[in-house]
Image (cartoon, coloured by chain):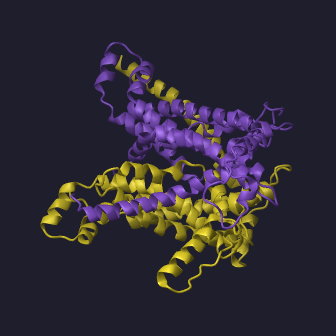
Amino acid sequence: MAASAARREERTAYLFLAPGLALFFVFVLVPVVAAFYLSFCRYDIIHSPNWIGLANYQRIGKDVANHGVFYLSLRNTAQYAVGTIPLGMALALALGLLVNAGLRGVSIYRTTYYLPVVTSLVAISMVWMWLYDPNYGLLNYLLELISRVASAVMQRHISLPPQTWLANPKQAMPAIVLMSIWRGLGYNMVIYLAGLQGIPEHLYEAAKLDGATPWQRFKAITWPLLKPTTAFIFVVSVIGASQVFAQVYVMTNGGPNNATTTIVHQIFQNAFSFMKMGYASAMAFVLFGIIFVLSLVNLRLLRGGEVEYV
Amino acid sequence: MRLTLPRKLVLHALLAAGAVTTVLPFLWMLSTSLKPEPEIFRFPPAWLPHLWKWGNYREAMEAAPFGRYFLNTVIYATAVTCSNLLLCSMAAYAFARLRFRGRSVLFILTLGTMMVPGQVTMVPVFILLKRWPLLGGNDLLGIGGHGLLNTYVGLVLPGAVGAFGIFLLRQFFMTLPRELEDAARIDGCSEVGIYWRIILPLSAPALATLGIFTFTAAWNEFLWPLLITSKDSMRTLQLGLQVFQTQYTTRWDLLMAGTVVVTIPVLLIFLAGQRYFTRGIALSGMKG
């Protein structure tokens, strides 16, 4: 009786799991294996795959050694990560602290900061392209307004000349970075807020009784207790940054002069514009490796030294 | 914490500065969407349109079959959401409540699929859909037709279930008290009945969270519809926005009207279901 009940439970479990696991098998497991195989092939979708051994990986190695396009995409992706993550996290923490300061009516701010997160990256990218327009864009107008105000205040001529933003190889990536920070801020802020709300109030009260300044309280209580939150946001941000694509595709399509092409943009172009599916698959595995190693390193670095005061 | 009045004012000023920065691009999008074309190409630009040209919206919607794009997006996002709610909750129920051999291995494998970046599987999944045997004009070997490209099934199927959703719901199911199920089991209720009549109704908040996350993500999805659809009749709203950009010019007035239309549904969903967004972030394991 008991044995058959256990068997029935097991059968039910497999039935419940079957559709989901079948989909994972067909659309994740098989494709990963297939992609690995394709990365050793020449394949253009029309003709059947042609085994060429390590040639795709050698080509990537040669490209990196000669500072070719894939090298540029690695460099640009790294620039994007370095540009967005530290500044984005610092701003998110600052906003989280402000929202958590105990003012009335903060829920309106919290809602507002989250708006860009739910809006599609494509729509947002198009709006920012318009903001960045070199001739009629709002940002150049704001620069002009700022120069005028600054000149009036400082009593001498200050000029912030109009910029070409996305059309300028030197400014295009910073412009994409700025937009991406703006868009991601709300998400990171909400996570920081959840972390901040988990810190018990009595710790701050005790520190106040001991005469700790706000900065000392932040350093001794808030920052150490937020460490798991910071670690989580950091790991998620690194993975996200290494996969940046849509804003690049919409705003610059990798240009000008490959100044903004990223790893995923290269994978996409090689696979679906140049029909080099094997080469693209090899790139995808390089990306997979990068993400894997970075995640391991991050987890190793961020684990340990965790603080519990409660 | 008690704050003095000047300090409160400073904090409010900082928060407001952040809010203005956040909202400004949206307001600029709205303002541009209502300007007649000559007003757009003017520097310095005006904050508000001189002449409010509501006709931009009609013109934008007529520039491409946007009604069809809208319908496609609704079908795609709804189908992905429904299948995720059903399949994720089924798997989550098995992982949270049932005992079976291989449970921990299968659970770890499921979570492992989150490690694989979509770009790795993108090419083979595309080929798989194109070469799907016996459908879309293909023969048994998957040759001859377009397979599942340009179909709703092709759009929905690869994202019909997700490890994140399974994980989220499992976490929630584990917090539910077991007493109700035990009572139902004694009364002779089957496992399917317990899942359907007890667990799912009790999990409405978690299901709402997953549903809203999935729907907005699908609504905003760009890369996948870009790959799978090439026919105009199958495209989604996010792809439709590209019609206002040609190689040489961009109709900013119409493009901004288009982005407003594309953006408003998700913003409404967000404003209506706000608490589920925040709860989802708390549920996805931020407790350390």
Q: Residue at x 85, y 49 (%)?
A: A46
Q: Which chain is purple?
A: B
Q: Nearer the viewer, residue B101 or A61?
A: A61
Q: Position of residue B106 (x, y in %)?
A: 49, 40
Above or below B44: residue B173: above
Q: Position of residue A82 (x, y in %)?
A: 53, 71
Q: Is residue A243 left or right of residue A269?
A: left
Quadrant of the rendering where the N terminus of chain A is positioned: top left
Quadrant of the rendering where the C terminus of chain A is positioned: bottom left
Q: Nearer the viewer, residue B140 or A117?
A: A117
Q: Quadrant location of residue A175?
A: bottom right
Q: Is residue B225 left or right of residue B135?
A: left
Q: Which chain is yellow?
A: A
Farthest bottom residue? A156
Q: Residue at x 70, y 37 (%)?
A: B154
Q: Is residue A291 left or right of residue B192?
A: right
Above or below A90: residue B256: above
Q: Is residue B145 left or right of residue B70?
A: right
- Asked if residue A137 shows in the view, the reply is yes
Q: Quadrant location of residue A220?
A: bottom left
